[in-house]
Image (tube, rainbow, N blue to C red):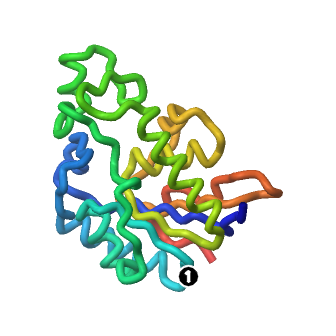
Amino acid sequence: MSTPSQIWLIRHGETEWSKTGQHTGREDLPLTERGEAEAHEAAALLAGAGFDRVLVSTLQRARRTAEITGHLPQARLEPMVQEWDYGRLNGRTLEEIRQEFPGWSVWSGPVPGGETVEDVAERADIVLDQILNAGGTFAVFSHGHFLRILTARFLDLDPRAAKHFALGTAAISVLGFDSGFPAILRWNVKTPPCR
């Protein structure tokens, strides 16, 4: 098994539903004007970063973010990195869901007609196996909950630990290794690092 030098995680820019806190899931929404601007900001942060492989969710918000940053031409569209399928909770805010399921959280469910957290973690594990076996430096253009769960699994944590990893739209995070241990090297970056 090879080891990637780094895995860069890029969340898509803002959509109308991410702006309002609606669970977007597989709804194929475009970026807002602000989301397009965020993707351009991400492009500046990614300038000079070279990737051996790029994986991009098939949903247009992730594809457009990858396109604006200039990484879509080398990308492989990968359905496995799509967002959590929220089933019939898709399009609903946390407050709306809690009217039906008091105290509800995506991390504890239920998610009627959608994926469980274990289902999403299984997809993340498959993607991580592909990355670790291929080696090199990867970029993954995807979605908030999926990238958070992928991070938890990379760190060998329970997928529910992802609830502790806040991730803004068009934010960039970097996973890698520290003394041989999986580690978060950068997280939720939206501004250039201080030089």
- Which residue is at the front of the view, 187 or 125? 125
Q: Residue at x 47, y 75 (%)?
A: 45
Picture coordinates of residue 192 (x, y %)? Answer: 51, 73
Q: What is the quadrant of residue 134 in the picture?
A: bottom right
Check disc 1 and report the residue beneath it: 50
Location of the N terminus by quadrant is bottom right
Picture coordinates of residue 153 (x, y %)? Answer: 58, 43
Q: Residue at x 21, y 41 (%)?
A: 22
Location of the C terminus by quadrant is bottom right
Q: Residue at x 68, y 53 (%)?
A: 183
Q: Is residue 188 above or below residue 113?
A: below
Q: Is residue 190 above or below residue 124?
A: below
195 sits left or right of 69 in the view: right
Q: Is residue 33 above or below residue 129?
A: below
Q: Report the amino acid beneath label 1.
A: Gly
Number of marks drawn: 1
Picture coordinates of residue 65 (x, y %)? Answer: 32, 70
